[in-house]
Structures are given as C-alpha cells and as structure tokens.
Image: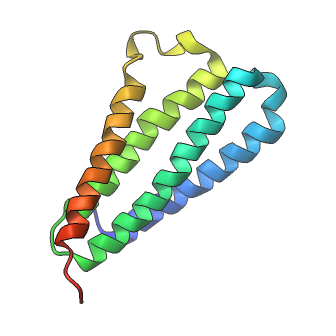
C-alpha cells in the first residue's frame, strides 16, 4: 500500500474513532448501559490508536524500499474493521449478534498484533535518507 493511501485510511479511521467516541459518550451513553458503553469506548480507543499506527506505517513506508510497512498498514486496517467493528456491533446490538461469527474479534486482534510485528521489522530494516 502506498504512503498516501495509508494516510488517507488512517485519517478516515481517526475521524470514525473520534466520531464514535463522541457518539458513544454523548448520544448513546444512556442506551448502551455500563457494559455496552465500556465496549463501545474500547472499540473507539483501539480504532484511534491503530489509526495512529497506520500513520507510523506510512512514515516507514515512505522511508523504506520493501512493502512490509504497507502490509502492516493493511493488517491494521483489516484488524480494525474486524476487531473494533464487531465490538461496536456487540455494544449496540447485544452479545449474541455475531452468532457463528463470534471468532471475528479475535481474528481482528491477531491482525492488529501482526501489523505491529510487521511494522517493527519494517522499521528495523528502514534506511535513513
């Protein structure tokens, strides 16, 4: 993934995370209850931090020749959709909403972890320009 595209996805993720955080704390707080509110906040927090991680991946991608940083950014994007996206769904619609797809949040978490490892390797390999 090219640096400009990574930055675009990072910015969109940051916007969604900020909007979700505001929505969860202002408009949905009374509807979600304590457990749902905490889950919604956790989803927004993870999404926001991984938007920042994507910005880091864009920086590393711009300074390196391999595509590992781009793959890390893609892993962050997929992981955020699977992890934060399903947490938002659970918070809004209840624990049983995923049914047989209950394995999506852990797969998303693994994608996020894989993204961090790929970014670490890409950073280690990065050449100073």
Q: Image height check: is 92 above or below 78?
A: above
Residue 109 in view of the camera = yes
Between 129 and 90, the one lying in front of the other is 129
Which picture quadrant has residue 87? Answer: top right
Residue at 42% from the left image edge and 59% from the top image edge: 53
Q: Quadrant of the C terminus?
A: bottom left
Residue at 26% from the left image edge and 62% from the top image edge: 69
Q: Position of residue 31 (x, y in %)?
A: 80, 23
Q: Position of residue 83 (x, y in %)?
A: 45, 34
Does residue 16 appear left or right of residue 82 in this picture? right
Q: Position of residue 77 (x, y in %)?
A: 39, 48
Residue 5 in view of the camera = no
Does residue 19 appear left or right of residue 103 in this picture? right
Q: Quadrant of the N terminus?
A: bottom left
Q: Image height check: is 122 above or below 79?
A: below
Does residue 44 appear left or right of residue 120 in this picture? right
Looking at the picture, the colour scheme in use is rainbow
Number of numbered discs visible in the structure rendering: 0
Between 38 and 18, the one lying in front of the other is 38
Which picture quadrant has residue 6? Answer: bottom left
Residue at 54% from the left image edge and 9% from the top image edge: 96
Residue at 25% from the left image edge and 68% from the top image edge: 123
Which picture quadrant has residue 105? Answer: top left
Q: Position of residue 60 (x, y in %)?
A: 30, 71
């Amino acid at each position: 993934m090219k640096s400009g595209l990574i930055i675009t996805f990072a910015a969109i993720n940051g916007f969604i995370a900020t909007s979700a955080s505001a929505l969860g704390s202002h408009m949905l707080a009374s509807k979600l209850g304590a457990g749902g509110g905490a889950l919604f906040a956790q989803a927004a927090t993870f999404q926001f931090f991984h938007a920042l991680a994507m910005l880091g991946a864009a920086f590393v991608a711009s300074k390196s020749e391999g595509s590992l940083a781009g793959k890390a950014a893609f892993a962050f994007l997929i992981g955020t959709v699977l992890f934060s996206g399903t947490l938002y769904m659970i918070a809004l619609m209840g624990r049983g909403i995923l049914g047989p797809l209950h394995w999506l949040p852990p797969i998303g978490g693994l994608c996020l972890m894989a993204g961090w490892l790929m970014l670490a390797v890409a950073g280690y390999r990065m050449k100073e320009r």
